[in-house]
Amino acid sequence: MSNLLTSAIEKEFEEHVLHYLDSLTLNNKDEWHHILFNQDYYIAGYYECEQWLKTHNISVFEAIGYCQEYEQDNFGEQYKKYDNAETTVNMLVYALGSEWLFTNGEDFIEDLLSEEFLSNLPAPLSLDFPYVVYDMNTYELQNSFAKEEDAISEYERLDTVRENGSFYYIDLNDSSERDTLEEIIEALD
């Protein structure tokens, strides 16, 4: 397949993501491609789609060939008719969007979601005190610490003091643990 994914298209996709940020979470990564490039038309209108191809210096024949090759490689057959610019461009964007997510897009979105998440942390959480101990029974913050060893010590102390305590230690610097904290925060709302 020829590489039609240019830096200009990548930049355009990054801007496109901003419109869908509320629909994207670290927990629904497997849906990102559908949400961004298949849930709605990327571009509507024949003229607008023709202009998009011209803007990105892609001929109609290149676009159709890319789409047909993408379909063959991913679905085992060519099932669409590319008889207008709107169908062609939206399928091209679907295919390029898949490539972009695989190469750079996932990291870009994860960084955006992490920034958004960290900037909206409820008080008293902050990156100044990124080590957090939560009570999973009550969803209450027990304490947050600047040093990891202090958080671990408090976590161990609380877990031995309370028989029924189910405490959880979270490091806000670890994006996978932020998912857990995000679930806790959602449960509080």
Image (tube, rainbow, N blue to C red):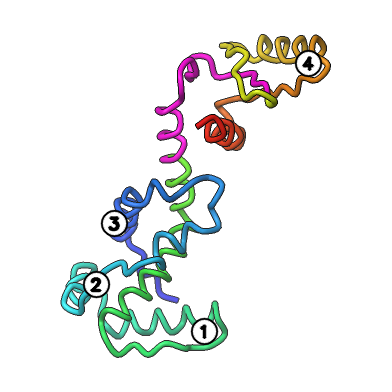
Mark before the other along the chain sequence, 4 or 3: 3
Q: Earlier in the sequence, mark 1 or mark 2?
A: 2
Alpha carbon distance from label 1 to label 2: 25 Å
Check disc 2 and report its element: helix, strand or loop.
Answer: loop
Dot in front, 1 or 2: 2
Circle 3/circle 2 CB separation < 8 Å: no
Q: Are marks 1 and 2 in contact (CB under 8 Å)?
A: no
Amino acid beneath label 1? Gln
Q: Quadrant of residue 87?
A: bottom left
Front residue of 20/114: it is 20
How dense is the environment of label 4, judged by Cα within 10 Å: few (below 14), some, or many (20 and up)? some
Single out the mark in the foreground, 3 or 2.
2
In terms of image quadrants, where is residue 112?
top left
Q: Which residue is mark 4?
A: 159
Residue drawn where x is 77% and y is 14% of the image = 156
Q: Position of residue 8 (x, y in %)?
A: 27, 58
Q: Which residue is mark 1?
A: 72
Lower sequence index among marks 1 and 3: 3
> 144 or 122: which is nearer to us?
122
Please indicate whether residue 157 sits to the left or right of residue 7 in the image: right
The reply, left or right, for residue 112 in relation to residue 54 is: right
Of badges 4 and 1, nearer the viewer stands 4
Residue at mark 1 to residue at mark 3: CA–CA distance: 26 Å
Q: CA distance from mark 3 to mark 2?
A: 16 Å
**Tag in front: 4 or 2:** 4
Residue 78 in view in this figure: yes
Query: Does 133 appear in magenta?
Result: yes
